[in-house]
Amino acid sequence: CRLKLKRSAHIRSVFELLSSVRYSLFVSSLEWRAECKKRAYKTVLSLIEPNITPSQLLENAAWLDPAHYEDIVEERFLGHLCGYPLCDNTTKEVMTFCVFD
């Protein structure tokens, strides 16, 4: 009976240790995701501006996903710039869109 109590206490302590490790991994993954989002946001803001060099685009490409790139193109267009980050041409006409129900 004593062996059984020692064994269950040992299993309980191992389980508690694993739970704390899982929790710390979960927290660190949340922190990592938040840091990635911050970095992607800063990258989007920097690529909206004109005069982007190819090296800047390549350095920052790892932080972008298709949605971020779409945001860059859209924001540049709204700022009357070509949507492609390496192009500094301005747009001459602003297109209007009509949405019908």
Image: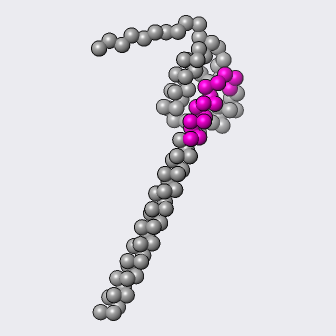
Q: Position of residue 27 (x, y in %)?
A: 48, 56
Image vertical order of residue 98 relative to residue 16, above or below? above
Quarter that holds the C terminus: top left
Res. 36 image quadrant: top right
Of the pair 54 and 22, the residue shown nearer to us:
22
Of the pair 70 and 97, the residue shown nearer to us:
97
Q: Which residue: 34% across, 82% down?
A: 8
Q: Magenta part mainly helix, strand or loop?
A: helix
Image vertical order of residue 90 relative to residue 21, above or below? above
Q: Position of residue 22 (x, y in %)?
A: 44, 63
Quarter that holds the N terminus: bottom left
Q: Write the start and end of the magenta stretch as one range.
A: 38-52
| Residue 31 among magenta residues | no
Of the pair 58 and 92, the residue shown nearer to us:
92
Q: Which residue: 51% across, 35% down?
A: 65
Q: Which residue: 45% across, 67% down?
A: 20
Res. 86 image quadrant: top right
Image vertical order of residue 101 relative to residue 28, above or below? above
Image vertical order of residue 21 relative to residue 49, above or below? below
Q: Position of residue 37 (x, y in %)?
A: 53, 41
In the image, taking residue 9 as reference, residue 82 lies left or right, namely right
Q: Which residue: 52% across, 22% down?
A: 74
Q: Position of residue 60 (x, y in %)?
A: 63, 36
